[in-house]
Image: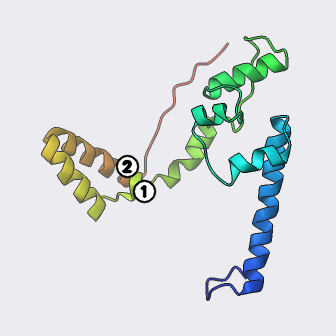
Amino acid sequence: MMASLGPWNEDERSAIRSSMEAVYKVFVGRVAEGRHKQPGEIEPIAQGRVWTGTRAKELGLVDEIGGLDAAVAEAKNLVALGPTSELEVYPPGPTLRDLLAGFGQVQAPLGLGAESESLNLLLHSLAVVDPAVASATEHLVKLVVSFRSQTVQAVAMLPVMQ
C-alpha cells in the first residue's frame, strides 16, 4: 500500500481516510476534554484549521497567550512547585562526549561544500553586499569542510583537584 509505484486504489484510499478520521476524532475529543466542552462544541470551530493565538483565545481553545517560559511557569504553579524549583529538560543539551562523538560527522551548513554551486552563489551574493563578509564566509566554510579529511588535534586543559 505504501509503495510509490502507482496510485492508491479505493480500498487503500478508504483505509487511509478511516485512519485519519480516527486520529482526528481522538484529537477533537482530547481538545474538548481539556477545554471542559463536548466534542460537538469543538468540531464546528476545529475542522482541521490552525488558529492564531489571539483567535484561539477568542474561541476558547487556549487560556492564555505566551511562550514556553510562561507555560512552564504556569505548569509549576498548577502543581505547586516553587518558582526556584529546578526542572530537568528532555532531551538534555549535548555533553562534551556527544560533541566529540559527532565531531567526525561535521557537515558544512546548508549542504555547502568547498566547491559547490550553492557556495559560489552565496559568496557572489555576499560579495555584492560586503566583500569582506564574503571572504570570511568562504574561509569558514572551507575550514569546516576540511574537517572531513584532515586530522584535527585538540588539547583540553582541565582543572585537577587535589
* Residue at x 51% of width, y 31% of height: 156
Instruction: Look at discs 1 and 2 and give the one toward the viewer.
Output: 2
Q: Is residue 90 left or right of residue 66?
A: right
* Residue type beneath disc 2: Val
Assign a secondary structure to mark 2.
helix
Q: Measured from the top left, where is residue 2 in percent x and y?
A: 70, 79
Q: CA distance from mark 1 to mark 2?
A: 8 Å
Q: Measured from the top left, where is residue 39 in percent x and y?
A: 83, 47
Q: Quadrant of residue 99?
A: top right
What residue is shown with label 2? Answer: 144
What residue is shown with label 1? Answer: 148
Whether residue 27 is situated above or below residue 116 in the rendered picture: above
Q: Is residue 13 left or right of residue 50?
A: right
* Residue at x 37% of width, y 54% of height: 145
Other-residue count near label 1 (Cα within 10 Å), few / some / many at <14 / 14–19 / ≥20 = some
Q: Is residue 159 left or right of residue 117?
A: right
* Residue at x 62% of width, y 83% of height: 4
* Residue at x 51% of width, y 26% of height: 157
Whether residue 142 is situated above or below residue 158 in the rendered picture: below
| Quadrant occupied by the C terminus | top right
* Residue type beneath disc 1: Arg
Q: Which mark is residue 131?
A: none
Whether residue 32 is situated above or below residue 17 in the rendered picture: above
Q: Measured from the top left, where is residue 153 in percent x and y?
A: 44, 43
Other-residue count near label 2 (Cα within 10 Å), few / some / many at <14 / 14–19 / ≥20 = some
Residue 108 seen: no
Q: Is residue 144 left or right of residue 79?
A: left
